[in-house]
Amino acid sequence: MDDSMKLILGDCLKEMKKLPDDSVDLVLTDPPYNIADKNKLTKVGNEFKTNAEAWGKWDTMDSKQYFAWIKNIVQESYRILKNSGSFVSFFDKFNITYLRDMGLDAGFHPVNFYALVKRNPVPNLRKNGFTSGFELGIIFNKDKKSKKWNFLGQNQMQNYYLYSIGQKSTSHPTEKPISPMKRLIMIFTDKGDLVCDPFMGSGTTGAACKEMGRRFIGIEIDKEYFDIAKNRINNTQGSLF
């Protein structure tokens, strides 16, 4: 493993507490949403599975416990970020206003919401509602005056990203597409900067960082997913700083 890629098997909150203050340029992550539901479908490869299966390794908390836990993650993210740093997190769209309020309470400055829009969402086979055509995230700066901001051009700076599902690199059930992660990394960091993902999952953020010459700290508590991410990042071709 490249020295610029630090992968940690462990509890994200405990491991984040070991990181120094003001040491990270970007936190880019996708935490568990705590929404396991046997009646919802998720596309895993070419198969449709229930949401409960997709989140089978996640023990659901009650809402109060879950939001208190996420709030601690947000506060730790604020602490480890440099003043010029940014925090980007995807979240359950029905609860994302809670994440917004947690960010404000921690001291972050809101930038915008960010949507991943699916060209080919999973069909609603029961025909009892809308298809789920987008995922939602939120972007914060730690300090709006000293923020890092690389404007990539008008056609790349929309607060949404269009992509097609089904093009996955791993067996992880909730793998994020790599292209929008690379775009966000380009906007909020420069080569050689340090990116942290407390919920590494399939290793998408780490692979994107390695391709683009950013340093990376990834934390994952599940050994199976950790091994998936480690193998993926090891097999990703890196870019020189």
Image (cartoon, rainbow, N blue to C red):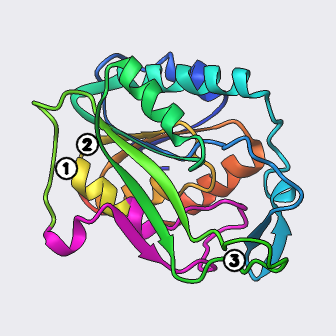
Residue span colored magenta: 153-181
Q: Do the numbered discs 1 and 3 sit on residues whose CB atoms are within 8 Å?
A: no
In this rendering, the answer to whether 122 lies above or below 239 is below
* Residue 191 position (above or below residue 111): below
How far apart marks 1 and 3 lie (CA) works out to: 35 Å
Q: Quadrant of the C terminus?
A: bottom left
Q: Earlier in the sequence, mark 1 or mark 3?
A: 3
Q: Residue at x 79, y 41 (%)?
A: 58
Element assignment for label 1: loop
- Residue 154 appears left or right of 163: left
How many discs appear? Answer: 3
> Is residue 160 covered in magenta?
yes
Please provide percent x and percent y for residue 121: 62, 77
Task: Locate residue 135, reporting x and y percent.
Answer: 54, 60
Left or right: 125 as drawn, with respect to 14: right
Q: Amino acid under label 1?
A: Asp
Q: Are marks 1 and 2 in contact (CB under 8 Å)?
A: yes
Q: Is residue 237 visible?
A: no
Q: Is residue 146 left or right of residue 208?
A: left
Mark 3, other Cα within 10 Å: few <14 / some 14–19 / many ≥20:
some
Q: Which mark is residue 190?
A: 1
- Residue receiving disc 2: 193
Q: Which mark is residue 122?
A: 3
Q: Name which residue lies at 16% across and 65% down.
A: 152
* Front one among 42 and 6: 42
